[in-house]
Image (cartoon, rainbow, N blue to C red):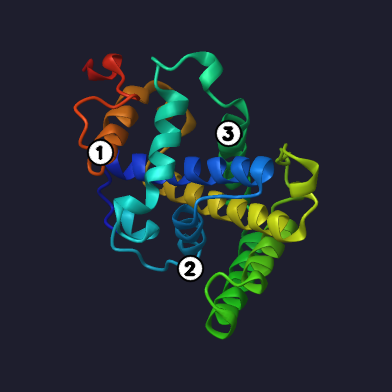
């Protein structure tokens, strides 16, 4: 990837994290998630040598619209506090912390990469999103990331969380969230930067939303974000 990264690069990577967090919440509470978002997040785990940041998510902004909407609803200052989802915020922040810890553990990273390669082989045999593939990715998370702290506690409906297929989808998505967090850090993102550059992130995300929404004013349009 190009070493000259823009605000949009950082925003796209951050959107990838929010897209995962929203899907984890959806699966835990409803047992369902958006197919395009799910496939995009899982495919990001198999993306090697991307041409640019968006390429990690299939090169199409349509693939990250769930993440765009989630980010805007979570960090827009004109959204009422009760509209924001604290569970999603927790997932995002914990993924960032866990990725930082994981990046310092080369042994665990090596094990994860080996399991992902095993999942890549399974994709060729069973199909890209077969339950065996998802189970393998879930194992990579369980064995190498679950032992780290803070451990992500997923809240939701007991029936969904106890369903092995849904539980594996959630763990595989959390692995994709670690991948997106790693990408975010690689392109210059940081938690302090997110705090101080919120308006810049919003401007970039609003631009991405406008590529698919022609309305003059998005419900997530943050008037404060226009300040320089």
Q: Position of residue 104 (x, y in %)?
A: 60, 51
Task: Write the residue at 59% across / 81% down.
Answer: 126
Q: Which residue is mark 3?
A: 88
Instruction: Report the Cα–Cα distance between label 3 and label 1.
Output: 24 Å
13 relative to 143 in the view: left or right = left
Residue 192: horizontal and vertical position, in percent? 46, 27
Mark 1 = which residue?
213
The N terminus - image quarter: bottom left
Sequence-first tag of 2 and 3: 2
Eye-nearest disc, 3 or 1: 1
Q: Residue furthest bottom?
A: 125
Q: Residue at x 68, y 57 (%)?
A: 141
Q: Classify mark 3: residues with Cα within 10 Å, few (<14), some (14-19) or many (20+).
A: many
The 10 Å Cα crowd at callout 1, few under 14, some 14 to 19, many 20 or more, is few
Residue at 64% from the left image edge and 57% from the top image edge = 169
Residue 25 in view here: yes
Q: CA distance from mark 1 to mark 2?
A: 29 Å
Helix, strand or loop at disc 1? loop
Secondary structure under the numbered disc 2 in the rendered image = loop
Identify the residue at image location x=56%, y=69%: 129
Q: Earlier in the sequence, mark 3 or mark 1?
A: 3
Q: Nearer the viewer, mark 1 or mark 2?
A: 1
Comparing marks 2 and 3, which lies closer to the viewer? 3
41 above or below 5? Answer: below
Q: Pointer 2: what residue?
A: 46
Position of the C terminus, as image quadrant, is top left
Q: Position of residue 48 (x, y in %)?
A: 41, 68
Q: Please give the label number shown on residue 121.
A: none
Local SS, label 3: helix
């Amino acid at each position: 990837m190009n070493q000259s990264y823009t605000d949009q690069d950082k925003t796209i990577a951050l959107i990838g994290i929010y897209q995962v967090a929203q899907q984890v919440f959806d699966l835990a509470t409803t047992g369902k998630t958006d197919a395009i978002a799910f496939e995009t997040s899982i495919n990001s785990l198999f993306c090697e040598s991307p041409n640019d940041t968006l390429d990690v998510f299939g090169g199409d902004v349509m693939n990250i619209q769930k993440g765009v909407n989630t980010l805007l609803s979570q960090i827009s200052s004109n959204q009422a506090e009760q509209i924001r989802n604290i569970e999603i915020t927790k997932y995002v922040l914990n993924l960032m912390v866990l990725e930082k810890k994981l990046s310092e553990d080369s042994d665990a990273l090596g094990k994860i990469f080996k399991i992902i390669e095993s999942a890549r082989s399974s994709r060729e045999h069973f199909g890209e999103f077969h339950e065996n593939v998802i189970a393998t990715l879930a194992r990579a998370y369980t064995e190498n990331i679950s032992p780290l702290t803070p451990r992500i506690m997923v809240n939701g409906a007991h029936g969904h969380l106890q369903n092995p297929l849904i539980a594996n989808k959630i763990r595989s998505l959390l692995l994709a969230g670690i991948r997106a967090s790693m990408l975010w850090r690689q392109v210059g993102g940081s938690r302090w930067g997110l705090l101080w550059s919120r308006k810049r992130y919003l401007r970039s995300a609003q631009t991405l939303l406008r590529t698919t929404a022609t309305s003059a004013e998005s419900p997530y349009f943050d008037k404060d974000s226009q300040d320089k």
